[in-house]
Each structure stands twice: as C-alpha cells, then as structure tokens.
Image: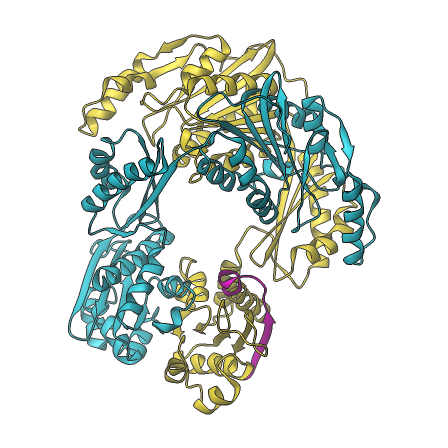
Chain colours: A yellow, B cyan
Amino acid sequence: MASCGLRFTLLIVNAEIVAVGSELLTPFRQDTNSLFLTRRLNELGVEVIFKTIVGDRPEHLLEASRRALSRAQIVVFSGGLGPTEDDLTRECVAQALGLELRRNHEMVTALYTRAAAMRIRMAENNVKQADYISGAELLKNPRGSAPGQWLDTSYEGQRRLVILLPGPPFELEGMFNEHCFERLKLALPEAHIATCELKIAMVGESTADQRAAVIYKQFPDVETTILAKQGEVQFHLKARGATQMEAEALVDKLSSLLEDEFADEIFSSGGESIEQIVGYFLQMRGATLSVAESCTSGLLAERITSVAGSSRYFMGGALVYSDQLKREFCGVPPLLLASDGAVSRSVAAALAEGIRQRCKTTLGIGITGIAGPGGGSEEKPVGLVFVALADGKHTEVVERRFPGDRERIRWFASQLALDLLRRKLR
Amino acid sequence: MASCGLRFTLLIVNAEIVAVGSELLTPFRQDTNSLFLTRRLNELGVEVIFKTIVGDRPEHLLEASRRALSRAQIVVFSGGLGPTEDDLTRECVAQALGLELRRNHEMVTALYTRAAAMRIRMAENNVKQADYISGAELLKNPRGSAPGQWLDTSYEGQRRLVILLPGPPFELEGMFNEHCFERLKLALPEAHIATCELKIAMVGESTADQRAAVIYKQFPDVETTILAKQGEVQFHLKARGATQMEAEALVDKLSSLLEDEFADEIFSSGGESIEQIVGYFLQMRGATLSVAESCTSGLLAERITSVAGSSRYFMGGALVYSDQLKREFCGVPPLLLASDGAVSRSVAAALAEGIRQRCKTTLGIGITGIAGPGGGSEEKPVGLVFVALADGKHTEVVERRFPGDRERIRWFASQLALDLLRRKLR
C-alpha cells in the first residue's frame, strides 16, 4: 500500500463524508450511507466532523471536494462513480487534488468481460469506470460495475486518506468492509474502544434520562448517547482506553450500574429486539402463544412473526375488529360487550383467555383500545388501551392511556403487550 | 421587513441547508428536517445545492457558516438555538457575517413569563435565547422556547437571506410555515411551478422506468423523478412556466400520457396510499372484507386498518400461522393440507372463501407462502406466495415468487393482496 510519508499528528483522526448525487438534494431521498460509514469509522476511533451532500454539477462537486480535503484528514466520497455523464466524482476529486486521471487497462478488460458475461453490449462511456486518480488503488466491486478507489496522499501539505465508494448501499457496505476497514486500521494510530448498548421498554425518554443521568454523569470518560423511539429507550455507551481492557472495564462499570438501576426494564444488552427476546423466552420455557387483536389488528402478530423461526412458539390468533368476531372467535359473552363495552378491562381479559383456549396455547394475549382519531368519548378517550395476558390460571390486565396519533397508539399497545410477555416469562 | 437593497440576479435562486448538532454526526441519528425544507423551498422555485451537517464545536460551525454564506443565496440553519452551552448557532452565524449579537428585552420578559407559567425557575443562561443577530427579526416559537431569526443581509457584496430555525421538527416546521414561507415568497422572483405525483403498484422499477422513459424523454422541460420502494413506484413530475397555467398544462400533458401507458397499474394521482384507495373502493361499493393470513401474519390487516375509519369495511379475520388454525378458523379440509401442503393454490383459495363465510363479509382474502429464511424446498422455494380473493361466486388465486429477505417477501405479499383488491373493486 502506498504511503505518502506524512503521519497523523492528532490522537483522534477526523473525517468528512461527502455524499454525491442530485437525487440526494430532492425532498424524496436521503443519504443513508453516512450512518453505516460513521459507525464503522467510529469503531476505528475516527470522528466524523462534517457531512456534505452535493449534486452532480462539476463546479459544486469540485467546491465540496476542495473544502472537505482542506478540513478533514479522511475524506470518504459516496456515489458518482458510475458510467453516465453525471458521474463525475473521479474527475472532480482528481482536479481538487491537482492529480491526473489514468486508465487501468486490466479494469477495461474486466468491464468488457463482465458485459459479455451478462450478454450486453457495453456502451463506450462505460470505460471511464476504469479511470483512477494518479497514485490511487482501484478497489474491486463484485456487486456492481464501478470500482472504488483508495488514495493515501496530501493536500496543502497535510496527509489525507481519500476513499471513493459507489453509491448503492449494498455495494458501498461490501466494499468498505472488504477493502477499506483493514487498510484504515493499518493507517491509523491504534485505538482501544469499547461499546455497549442497553435497551429498555415502556419508559419515557425524559424519565429514563433523569434516572440515568445521576449515574452516567459520574463517568465523564464514557460517551453516553440516549436514543428514544417508539416505546423503547437505548443507551449507547462508548469509551476509549490506553488498552482494550481499560476501555472495556470503564464501559462495564457504567453498564452494570445502569443495569442495576433499570433491572426491571432492561430487556437487552446485546442488541436484540424485544420481539427476539420474547421469542427466546417462549422457546426456553417451551411455551406457545396466540393473540386476539382488536385496535392493533395484526400489528402484534406481525411483529412477533418478523422473527425467523417464530412458528415454533406462535400459533396464530384472531383479528377481532368487529364485536361479532370478538364473540365468534374468542367467545366473548354478548352481555359483557353490551354492559362493559368492547373497550374494557373485562373484554380484554375475555379475549386473552378465549383465544388461548381456542388455539390451545400456553399463553393468550388480548388487546382492545381506541386508536382514534374518531371513536373516543369523555369516559373512554382516544388512546385508552387494555392489554391482557392469560395463562389459564390467571389473567393479568393492564390499562394505559397513550398520547399521539393512531399509528403511535397502536405501536405502543403492541409494545406494551410484548413487554408484558417479557416480564411474565423472564 | 428589512431589505438590504440588493436583488437576486439569477432566475433560479439557490439555497444551502445547514443542520447543526453533534448528535447528527453519530451513527444513530439523521437530519430529516432538510427533506421538509427542500420540499417547501422547491415549491417557491428555490433549488437546494448543498446540505451540510456540522456538530456543536464553534470552529466547525463558524467554518460551515462562512462556507454556506459564500456559495448559496439562501442559507437555512436548523438547530443550536437552545439555552445550553452547546447551542452556538446564533453566535457563530453572527461572527461569520461580522455582525453583533443584540439582546431583545421583550423576548427576555417573554422567556421569564413562559417559565413562570410552567412553574419552573429559569436558569440564567436561558436568557441568551433572546439574542439576535444585528438586523435580524426574531421569529416567535409557540411550540418551544427558542425563537428563530430572519435576516436579509449581504455577504462579500452578495445578497443573502439567512434563516435560523430550531432543531425539533415540530417547532421547525411550524415556524417555517408560519413565518418564513410567505416572507420568502415576497423576497423571491415569482415562480410558476406545477407538480404531479403518480403511483403504481407491483411493477418493478426498471420495467416502469423503461416504459415511462419513452414518454417522459419527450418532455425535457418537465423534471421527472422516479422513486421505488417496496412494491410501489412513484413518478414525481415538476415543471416551471412563464405562467402557472403554462406550467400546469405541461405537467398535465405528460401525466395524462403516463396514465394511458400505466392505465392498469396506476392507483393514485393525488398522493393517496394504496390502503386508502382500497378503503375508498370498498366503501363506494358497500363491500366488507375479512382476511386469513398465514405467512404475512397480520401485516395485511395492520396495513388496512392503518386507515382511520377502516372499521366501516374491515371486520377482522384470522392469523392462521399453524395448520391447526387453518382448519379451526377457516375450515380448510385436513385432506387438502395433507395432499397439497399448506403453501398451495388450493389452500389459499380455501382460506379466502373459508374466512369470508366465517366472517360473513362480501370479500375474503387468503395468504399463504414461505417467508423464509428456513422452510423452503426445491419444489416450494423461499419467496413462493399464493394470494386468493373470494367473493362467494368466484375465487381468484395469484401465485408469485418474490426475491429478497423475510421482511421484503411478507411486504410484497401484502402489497399483492392490496393490488388484487384494487383491481377487483375499481
């Protein structure tokens, strides 16, 4: 591998990610490659300090290239490496660096061979994919036609690592993992980084943060990121150390204190989803499950069966949107529906036990609620949800009132059901 | 409103969006405000030429501000307007422009009043939210505490419109709609822009593009964007004209040609989802629906009931993950399951007609298939799906083999069911 003789002088190396493509400047599409790239760069101790999104116009691409090269030590470009007239990343980065483009004749042959194998006649302009910036290595792309490039060079007297990757995520991720990660590791100062991810369910973000802050503030050397989405809060911990052991000890200490604080609520410390955890527990206990869903109408079952192999513990159930089907499939007594209403503690319990018996499963879940926007009343407002869990001996019913719109209320109801199952089974 | 006396000289005004916040440079979070801002700016004829994402460090923020001001006519900043030490957008933009920060005393009072109403004691540093860049107007934020700013100024002799908005999407969108859109419209050259969005189902992106390209290439003045996601292809058309009528005539001409070409496949030209369209048709025909889902296990029902008011036409159905429940809930004959297997044309038909009768609905849908990753065989590979639609007289069954992973196969199966319903009902 070429090395330009300059060394990185900072302890923490920084990077800029430049996403190229006019479609990324429309209201319809967004650069997502940078999330993958950031994760992998962070693993190497590299900090991303800027992200730039730029279209296909050469004057803009040249400006973005110069700017990135002037302010970051590693510059990763994604997109604009294809065969069309709009694909100008190669040309503009070369111009920014004041380097020439050369043609790799082996690659030209490879492009013609690839086209022949696919029984297509290659258009003349495809050949430009074999052009590389003087001094760069071409990176093979078994998933597409455009190769990437790796260049260890300098800009205005500073060492720069420049990486050109194709835009399609599938091609970019494969190429980065296979050709760039190890190369970067060798080129960078050694970094010892430990990470940990804790997930908790059904606790609000501000409550979680309040309870956690008392703890994580004692660890200023651990970077703690709190991420909340849809009834789940994640703590992402990251620490650097002089050795790997030191970094891991630091993260372990904080994570075990957080696990004590959230003993009841933490469902995963290894990245698993709550659907997976519930699946593990059901299998571990040799238990089976059926569901009767009214307001969520399939969302809970869909989430449970998103896990491969769920047919081992999930049998099925009923979508009981209408009252008629609550009677028909779960044997909910008509009198109960008339006296308490379809959205009630007693009907939730009858759904859970009814579906359990009907499907001959160990456990049964019943969900009924008002997802809105219509159908609410003063007594039973939009957002009111009852979730019941029956095991044949006992039926537990939880009542909640969720804020937000239809989608959010339904999601929270399914999340509550999964968390009930988790607590029951753990 | 202040005006600096300079005019925009280009016909098409351009913009840069700068998203501020260190969390936007992690692998966990992404700037999404720019999609909203781009959509609204495009409506005014403004083209977004760069997007920059920068953290909270003042030297980086200052650099990003200077760069944006040097290369775009409108610069919109989002985030970094709050009360904490990390909120430095005001300070850095002022410094980049060489302008002073002033304090608005009315706003100071308003901040104290707001805190008092919420029964909290305001921390001293909150007051800095009342600071504005000399010459800027403060924009009220009824959804949060940090006001925005609007500044019509110049940078290196060029007119610049500078807008500072708070980061939370809810606050940013409200503030832009209420305070910025009309101000921009007045400040910009008049633009006449027409748009149209056509959606088609169950046609691959490359097939759709091939068939459409013959048509849209005859309209170089209409910007055509093709967007594909999960069994749906969207054509977004946009044209400018000397008058609004001219722009609309241009878009109409292209869209009607595309509607002719895709007469069978287009399900929406007004932005509606396929779930909404199926709902309209069911209501229009006074029909009711039930479903029996095996491999999709609730996904179809969940999608149908994501539409508010779907209880008028959707009754419910059964989740028949196990063979036992296929018999129990839909009366599928045990012999049929034994001879043809659960994933077969005949079982799909039996599920559809069985659930229709059981739920006493006009129409019944049955879905069975192999979502994988396990469970496939040479004869019945992963991705094989049968969808049946029964109306009591006739049962139509469609067989498909979908590529991709479990999630994708299940999604396509539900999409195929919705498209079958649409074709039946239209």
* Residue A240 relative to residue B337: left or right: right
Expressed as whole percent of the image width and height from the top left, the position of residue A79 reads: 42, 27
Relative side of B338 to A61, left or right: left
What residue is shown at x 31% (from left), y 56% (from top)?
B415
Q: Does the rendering let one see residue B51? A: no
Q: How many marks?
A: 0
Residue A126 position in % (x across, y down): 28, 20
Instruction: Tell me the magenta residue range.
Output: A393-410
Give x and y (percent) for residue A109. Answer: 26, 17
Most foreground residue, B347 or B183: B183
Residue lying farthest to the left in this orientation: B393
- B399 vs A200, left or right, is left
- Viewer can see residue A154: yes
At x 38% / y 83%, what residue is drawn? A324
Observer-nearest of B399 and A426: B399
Q: Is residue B123 left or right of residue A314?
A: right
Vertical placement of residue B337 versus A194, above or below = below
Task: Place residue B6 in its image quadrant.
Answer: top right
Q: Residue at x 64, y 42 (%)?
A: B166
Residue A405 within the segment the image draws in magenta: yes
Q: Is residue B372 above or below residue A159?
A: below
Look at the picture and state if A80 lies above or below A392.
Answer: above
Q: Is residue A287 above or below residue A67?
A: below
Relative image position of residue B9 (x, y in whole percent):
49, 20
* Residue in view at x 52 percent, y 15 percent: A152
Q: Residue furthest bottom?
A: A335
Please tell me which residue lies in front, A262 or A302.
A302
Q: Is residue B310 magenta?
A: no
Q: Quadrant of residue A291?
A: bottom left
Q: Considering the image in quadrants, where does the C terminus of chain A appear?
A: bottom right
